[in-house]
Image (tube, rainbow, N blue to C red):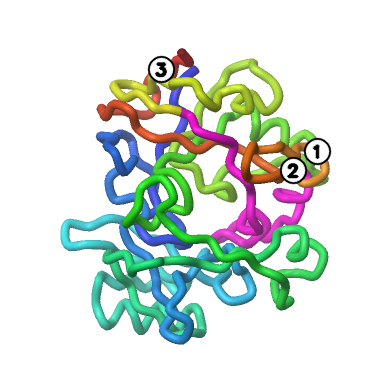
Amino acid sequence: MKIAALRRYPVKSVLGEDLRSAELGERGVPGDRRFALVDAESGLIASAKQPRLWRALLSARAEVTDGGVRVAFPDGSTVDGPSAGLDRALSKLSGREVRLTDVVPEGAALHRSIPEEVLESGVEAEVGATVTTLGAILPGTFFDFAPVHIVTTATLTAISARSPRGTVEVERYRPNLVVDTGEAEGFVEDEWPGRVLVVGGARLRVLLPSPRCAIPTLAHGSLPADRDALRVLASHHRVTIPDFGTFPTAGVYAVVEQGGAVAVGDGVELS
């Protein structure tokens, strides 16, 4: 196995950037989910997991800069931040007043729309939602659960084979690491929780499968909406996670046991 892609998402629920290499640490890929948007009305963290309110964020793209972050908007403009100008631009994009921050508010949480209800009723419908408190594994961070999210090429192929489109784009699942598993077939990472991945110079402990929300179904930049990116999993790959429940899943969450340099093309070993 080897690393096929390495990615980070500097602003939560905004598109991210491809990297050739990175030094993984306790917080995963440096700069990943460093920033988030706070909704002025509710005080919650803005998340496209609640697509009725926040799906437009996935039309913008963020990259790390020396001073913070730069966001590129659908009209071709770019705005650097943190700044009042970027707050205004992101508020205009989302249609709600938001503030960009890298300081995690006490009790930071977001609303996660129930994925099956989004599939049934559409992204504009007001559906049921659960509250997710951030920083479950690393308190004081904007990670939903753990700092590293991994998806394999075998899983992407398995989803594509069942999709009416015949393909699914990896961008929809927002992984940090895409692992090329060669000729392996099926959802191979289902067997990884509890084991260690040696990735380049780093060691990652795999925790559990990644439950999927409504985000994969949404338009991502130039990629159109695709309900089957979630519907396939809901129909063909529901996994029971002890102490959590049964969910459509794709990929796994991991923590960094030993930091180190990783690069696209590096070998990946399961131990």
Which label lies toward us, 1 or 3? 1
Label 1 and label 2: CA atoms lie apart by 5 Å
Alpha carbon of mark 3 to alpha carbon of mark 2: how far? 28 Å
Start and end of the magenta stretch?
206-232
Secondary structure beneath dot 1 equals helix
Residue 121: percent from the left, percent from the top? 80, 70
Tell me where residue 108 sits by quadrant: bottom left
Q: Are marks 1 and 3 in contact (CB under 8 Å)?
A: no
* Residue 120 or residue 209, whichever sits in front: 209
Residue assigned mark 3: 267
Vertical comparison of 87 with 110: above or below: below
Residue positioned most to the front: 243
**Crowding near the residue tagged with mark 3, few <14, some 14–19, many ≥20 C-alpha atoms within 10 Å:** some
**Does residue 250 appear in the picture of this structure?**
yes
In the depicted structure, whether residue 198 falls above or below residue 104: above
- Residues packed near mark 2 inside 10 Å, few (<14), some (14 to 19) or many (20 plus): many
Image quadrant in which you'd find residue 90: bottom left
Figure check: 201 above or below 26: above
**Dot 2: what SS?**
helix
Choose the circle earlier in sequence order: 3 or 2: 2
Residue 23: percent from the left, percent from the top?
Answer: 25, 34
The numbered disc on residue 233 is: 2
The one nearer the camera, 252 or 9, is: 252
Pointers 1 and 2 in contact (C-beta within 8 Å) = yes
Circle 1 is placed at which residue position? 236
